Image: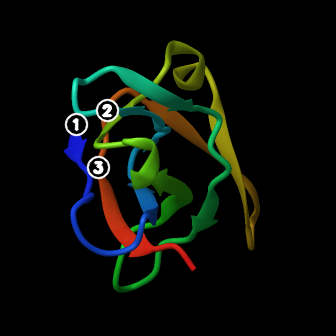
Amino acid sequence: MIALPHDDGPGEWVVCLRSCASKGVFVPSVVFLDSELSPIRLVTDLVSAFEPENWHRRGYLEARIPVFAAKEERWMLVFTRAQDLEGQTVIKTRRGPHKIPHVSTGEFGLIMMAAQ
């Protein structure tokens, strides 16, 4: 669970959520909660772009999710669903298609940016 900014700055943010691919990839879903920890919005089936591994970093899936502070979104809970774990991500490589299994745990990063 991640606390979201709401005091200063713009009323709308974008969360850039990167899920690192190693022996698999964690496929996230997100629920936004208010200050009382009541659910406000559920985001599933995120559209993610795959960035391949290079000499400086691992490959990752990246999704961008809008956050609406004006709608009292104060917390973000990241989780995965059973149906996501049943799937896989297929990417194109120089050698042809490559399957990345979905896993129940993994490493991810977050970047908060002001919406433009």
The reply to whether discs 3 and 1 touch (Cβ–Cβ < 8 Å) is no
The amino acid type of the residue labelled 3 equals Glu
Q: Does the rendering let one see residue 105?
A: yes
> Can you say whether 68 is above or below 54 in the image?
above
The amino acid type of the residue labelled 1 equals Met
Q: Nearer the viewer, residue 63 or 24?
A: 63
Q: Quadrant of the C terminus?
A: bottom right
Q: Quadrant of the N terminus?
A: top left
**Residue position marked by numbered label 3 in the rendering:** 107
Tell me which numbered mark, 2 or 3, is placed earlier along the sequence.
2
> Where residue 111 is drawn, which disc sits there?
none
The amino acid type of the residue labelled 2 equals Asp
Tell me which numbered mark, 3 or 1, is placed earlier along the sequence.
1
The reply to whether discs 1 and 2 touch (Cβ–Cβ < 8 Å) is no
Q: Position of residue 112 (x, y in %)?
A: 35, 68
**Label 3 – label 1 distance at C-alpha:** 14 Å
| Closer to viewer: mark 1 or mark 2 | 2
**Residue position marked by numbered label 1 in the rendering:** 1
**Label 2 – label 3 distance at C-alpha:** 25 Å
Q: Is residue 24 left or right of residue 90?
A: left
**Residue visible at 33% across and 20% down in the picture:** 38
Q: Secondary structure at mark 1?
A: loop
Q: Position of residue 74 (x, y in %)?
A: 28, 43
**Residue visible at 24% across and 71% down in the picture:** 8
Neighbour class for label 3 at 10 Å: few (<14), some, many (≥20)? few
> Can you say whether 97 is above or below 87 in the image?
below
